Image: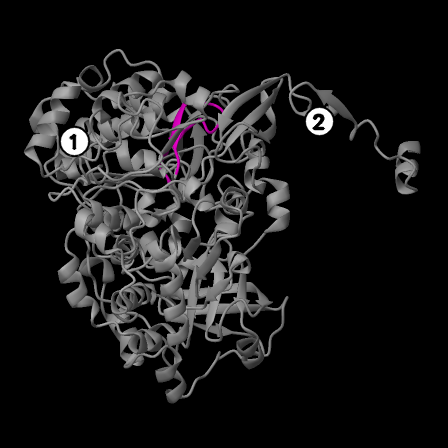
Amino acid sequence: MLNKIKEFFGFDIKEEKYALVDDPFFGKVAKEKAPDKWVRSTCGYCGVGCGLYIGVKNGDPVYVKGDPDHPVNRGTLCPKGLSEHEMVRAPSRLPGAMIKKEGKFEQVSWDEAFKKVSDKFKEVQAKYGKRSVAVISTGQLLTEEFYTLGKFVQLGLETNNYDGNTTLCMASAVMGYKQSFGSDGPPGCYEDFSHAEVIMLIGANIADNHPILKLHIARNKQVRGKKPTIIVVDPRHSKTANMADIYLPIKPRTDLAFINGLCYIIWEQGWMDEKFIKERTVGYREFIKNIQKYPPQEVAHITGIDVKTLYEVARLYAGARAAMSAWTMGVNQSAMGTDTVSAIVNLALMTGNLGKPGGSPMSITGQCNAMGTRESGFTSSIPGYRNFASAEDRREYANIVGVPEELVPTARGYAYPQIIEAIEKGEIKALWVVATNPLVSYPDQNRLRKALEKLDILVVQDSFMSDTAELADVLFGAATWSEKRGTYTNSERRCNLAKKSVPNYKDSKSDFEIVVEFSKYFEGKYELLFNGWSRPEDAFEEWKRVSKGRLCDYSGMTYEKIEKLGGIQWPCNEEHPEGTPRLYYEGMKTRNEEGKPKFVFADWHPLEENICTSFPLILNTGRTVEQFHTRTKTGTIKILEDLAPEAWIELNSKDAEKLQVKSGDRISLSSPRGKVDNVVVRVTEAVREGTVFVPFHFNMQLVNTLTQSLFDPKSFEPNYKQTAIQLHSEKVPDGIKLKEEEISGALGYQEQESAIEKILDKERVGSV
């Protein structure tokens, strides 16, 4: 009682609870959480790939500190990284293998779970064929786990219907690189941010999504002696736009026309690098013929960026000694994402900005190991960027790993959206979901949920009880970050080491262990694929042999060297024993037939789903710095939940006036596919009139109920960013009404009303 009285009057300052002690490694730390040891590792959130130390006390992670010697982050971390240890023992963790019995999950032995799933998979495949089992993976596993999982799915289960959630964020970058260079692989590096005279960020809100990269831009003045010119291209005035010297509030999804227009101006004014074009590229003449469709006046009409500004941006970019373009989901998550990526590469080729310090087109990856699965995961290509359709590539891979050549698939199976469509059609009867949560992240949620009801069995392998896990028939409870050992590869191709620092949670197993053990329930598959494998190092050593001589060459790496150097950028081999910062420098060939980067032209076209009288606004979705993806990791971390506990809608003041709402009020959103209620309003000038922004992380305000089943026809990446919607408030329940002339002029297109009818009448996935 006395203590309560002292606390009430402020006499008890909780000195013991908040006391600090001297830590030999990091100085002052909280006495209550003072670690027994620090373990050097790598962050498991986004694709930046920050180095960190995990503080361990009594077998639990209690602290995270940035690694001051790591070249990516130099000791700094974002809010998610600083609190990463708090998710490891979260109440939402899965304790091990679980089976749903009479509607409730019951923890069982791994043997029982493996037997149930393997028996069902065999039954389904015997009845409907090998491809009736599908797997959807993630960008969160270790490279060793991706390689092991992909090998088992393709060669063990013998189904090529295997894809990852990286298709939802990075597939357009992959296909764009393939079009231009003949292979996936970001050509630049973070160091380029500190060498570029001009940095153009296109659909990339790095301040929220990759905040550590701001520090690389901040170093530019230190390296060059003066500040770079920063150009931000984004329909929304994001936090990143606050950094800009030039902010371009482009109309939604007109970035392809914008880049084509810059290329036209550079050609028209003779600002291109003719020597670079002649000696180091192919396809330029044909490209210039096509680019004539994009004179400045037409591009200004399409994009909303005036002619004078277009010329100024083109002059700055072309005139810079080194210019860099970087992009993320604002480019990728589009029905024209692949072609927009190639257009950004075209701009770099025209101006000679490839393979030199500060000059590169650079995609920024969303997940900690999206690069690892792209290279080794066996989804869109045979490991090592080999082509399924190439008999030589299939033979080479089979010989390296000692499997029958006929076992290697001759074609890629269904991509993520095609897997969902195949479930709808009854082709796929069993689905294994690994470390992803489509019941929040996938577009057109009502359609997805109806499809999943048709499955004979749904297996979810995850560390946390997610929305998707709750629907599963069987759960494989997996270990998470800090509980397992292996490598992640970040956006700049840097392979980092992640260390096991604490015991697994309860009876959970690492994803590597789960796959290897599960393979033993299929006759002869363990012996064929994983004979003698017991550690992640076994997979890493095979991956090194598989990647040797390929663009993504890991053959010169060891765990010890990776840790010593603070990560290694591939290719790493005898020629480049400490890695390669940039690709396609002078003398380095590309992987297409010509051996040179290729100009790839594509036409821009208007939005498929545009505004109309019923749905007069455009919805943009995205992320926020406090949360990660569908919150399976961050949703139980108090400090992050306190900062961003629910979704909100950013609404222009003019639209707020029409709805008679103010900041703090709650409204509803609807589209042709559904409705989302109880979303809190933030009135802001960050979004233009007629557009709104909502973060997608939150399952209570599930914004992907509204988004459309429209995908890039080359990459199959969803078009998350432009959805026609209506808003409803208590005072204006029927929503915003526009006159016909406002609709036809709002985004500069014609026949908007018919676009909605096409969406309602047509199944978009089936048309891609």
Q: Which residue position is annotated with label 2?
A: 29
Of 373 and 73, which appears nearest the observer?
Answer: 73
Asked if residue 760 shows in the view, the reply is yes
- Residue 400 position within the rendered picture, expressed as x and y whole percent measured from the top left: 15, 20
Image location of residue 459, percent across then percent down: 33, 36
Who's the residue at 64% across and 43% down the image? 639
Badge 1 or badge 2: first in the primary sequence:
2
Compared to residue 199, the image places residue 502 above or below, namely: above
- Quadrant of residue 704 within the rendered picture: bottom left
Nearer-the-camera pick, 445 or 392: 392
- Nearer the observer: mark 1 or 2; the answer is 2
Say above or below: 358 vs 689: above
Q: Quadrant of the C terminus?
A: bottom left
Q: Which structural element holds mark 2? A: strand
Amino acid at pointer 2:
Val
Q: Compare residues 255 and 346 and report the one nearer the observer.
A: 346
Quarter of the image where one finds residue 493: top left
Magenta region, residue range: 472-490
Percent x, y for residue 762? 22, 67
Classify mark 1: residues with Cα within 10 Å, few (<14), some (14-19) or many (20+).
some
- State left or right for residue 77 relative to residue 393: right
In magenta segment, residue 290: no
Residue farthest along the top direction in this orientation: 532
Residue at the image point whose x is 38% and y is 50% from the top: 322
> Where is mark 1, residue-wise?
158
Choose between 529 and 715: the one closer to the eye: 715
- Give the x, y percent position of residue 609: 31, 70
